[in-house]
Amino acid sequence: AQKITQTQPGMFVQEKEAVTLDCTYDTSDPSYGLFWYKQPSSGEMIFLIYQGSYDQQNATEGRYSLNFQKARKSANLVISASQLGDSAMYFCATTTDSWGKLQFGAGTQVVVTP
Amino acid sequence: DADVTQTPRNRITKTGKRIMLECSQTKGHDRMYWYRQDPGLGLRLIYYSFDVKDINKGEISDGYSVSRQAQAKFSLSLESAIPNQTALYFCATSETGTGSTYGYTFGSGTRLTVV
């Protein structure tokens, strides 16, 4: 079974600084997708960014970018110019099968300070 | 209206009671999922369904059952609730296909407390 590891249970970042959230995955499948979700204190799951295993370029969505290092099985999320509203739990997830089932990491709690 | 609606949003129930969590969607997606979130464990898959006649167990199905009443409705039942089923439950849908974002949509979650 695939395994997702997020080694940072929590971190503080100052407003306007960039922050990198680590994610490593363990799969032998050549085809897979990597997702990052944000969960604010209100609880909803907000999709941030997606990277396919065959995508040649790192995915970017506004202030979010994914540092995809395939050989290292690493898919770190970079949030540039942090805002107070970025304070939330962040989950890395992956799917390797055609059924679309997601496997989640344990999450990283980010607190943005003024 | 939300694309994926979960009811109730919050529920407190007693040990041993039967409880049903409901999920309905207007996305027109064939695939529906139930996940459970516990602190420090992320989300884990309970059951998933790819159409009305297709129900599959996920990683942690023990103690749960599901019903896919229609393409748009997928209910999760706890036949006899126990305190360690206290968690945040998410329903999700996705579109058929591979090599894409799957068009995943999550409901707002149901916070269940079993006392």
Image (tube, coloured by chain):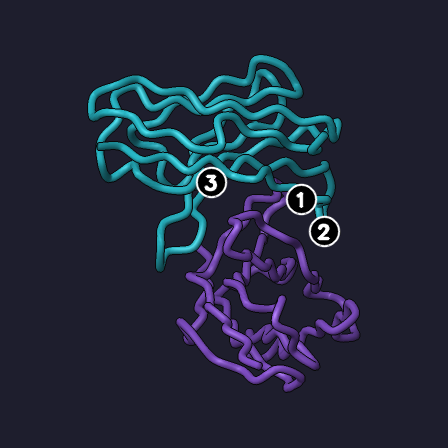
In the image, residue A99 sits, relative to residue A14, either above or below, namely above
Residue under mark 1: which chain is it in?
Answer: B
Q: Which residue is mark 1?
A: B104
Q: Which residue is mark 2?
A: B101
Identify which residue is drawn at 42% across, 36% down.
B46
Q: Which residue is mark 3?
A: B35
Secondary structure state at the residue bearing disc 1: loop
Q: Position of residue A77 (x, y in %)?
A: 62, 73
Q: Quadrant of the C terminus of chain A?
A: bottom right
Callout 1 crowding tier (Cα within 10 Å): few <14, some 14–19, many ≥20: some
Res A67 visible = no
Q: Colour of chain A?
A: purple
Q: Colour of chain B?
A: cyan
In the image, residue A93 sits, relative to residue A81, either above or below, namely above
C-alpha separation, residue under disc 1 versus residue under disc 3: 13 Å
Residue under mark 2: which chain is it in?
Answer: B
Identify which residue is drawn at 72% across, 29% down.
B1
